[in-house]
Amino acid sequence: MAENSKIEWTTHTFNPWIGCTKVSPACDHCYAEAMMDTRYGRVRWGAGEDRQRTSASNWALPRRWNKAAPMEGIRPFVFCASLADVFDNEVDPAWRRDLFTLIGQTPNLVWLLLTKRIGNVLKMTDPAACNPLLPSNVGIGATLANQEEYDRDRMKLADVARVCQPLFTFASIEPMLGPVILDKNAPDWIICGGESGRGAREMDPQWARDLRDGARRFGRAFFMKQMTGKKPIPDDLLVRQFPTPRVSSPDRSGDA
């Protein structure tokens, strides 16, 4: 459920729990469902199905990475969660509180919280509603697979940045299901990728080129993850930039 990741834009992947419900066109060919539900039968995917919390030994791994980071002279990125959604409405709020406590206690790590439910973030990090504050050592990202999703959610992500003050914001435009035109409200980091696996929908390379150029125009970091079906990335698209995290403010997780 964790350890060094094969995902090119992160160092580690950590899954505090497993299970989700499809909410976006990007979910149509969900690899997590194909693996954890269809292939292994570990959880059932969908609304009303139980999410499964991972083991205590798995939850101990980030503390190990946090301890090793200063000795290795790095600040690793941790993608959370590849087999779930941190801001899923059907997750026990106590689990999210436990996760935020863990994140706050591992300040040498940069946690990447990618969600398809960006509209839930402010509600689920509001102490007035007895929810924990977002820890300071996170980057918040939204999956924006096409122009409709970008136009709908980019300002929600900007609101999260204004209120919660994460290290940076990012957009996962993967799978890229159509051209996406960025504007001045674009997130700090733009990740682009084609779909892989059975039935992969084709990404026009020109869409990726236009996205790269838009990121450059607005001074955003751009990361080209993969082409459709993991075909070779053309030389002109092999751009893999990372965002510069803002300086973390004092830890805000605690028992809020």
Image (spheres, grey):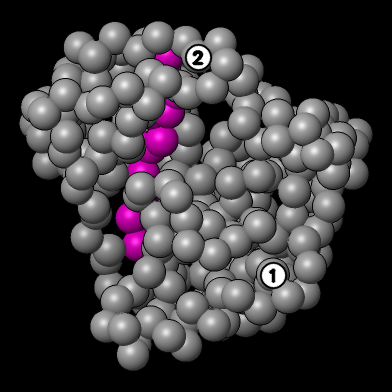
Identify residue type, mark 1: Asn
Q: Is residue 214 magenta?
A: no
Q: Which residue is mark 2?
A: 200
Q: Position of residue 156 (x, y in %)?
A: 47, 37
Q: Position of residue 107 (x, y in %)?
A: 45, 80
Viewer can see residue 162: no
Boundaries of the magenta span: 167-177
Q: Is residue 48 left or right of residue 150?
A: right
Q: Residue at x 54, y 82 (%)?
A: 64
Q: Nearer the viewer, residue 234 or 100?
A: 234
Q: Which residue is mark 1?
A: 58
Q: Nearer the viewer, residue 158 or 207?
A: 207
Circle 2 SS class: loop
Identify residue type, mark 2: Ala
Check contact, mark 2 vs mark 1: CB within 8 A: no
**Residue 59's quadrant in the figure?**
bottom right
Q: Residue at x 42, y 20 (%)?
A: 229
Q: Is residue 222 left or right of residue 10?
A: left
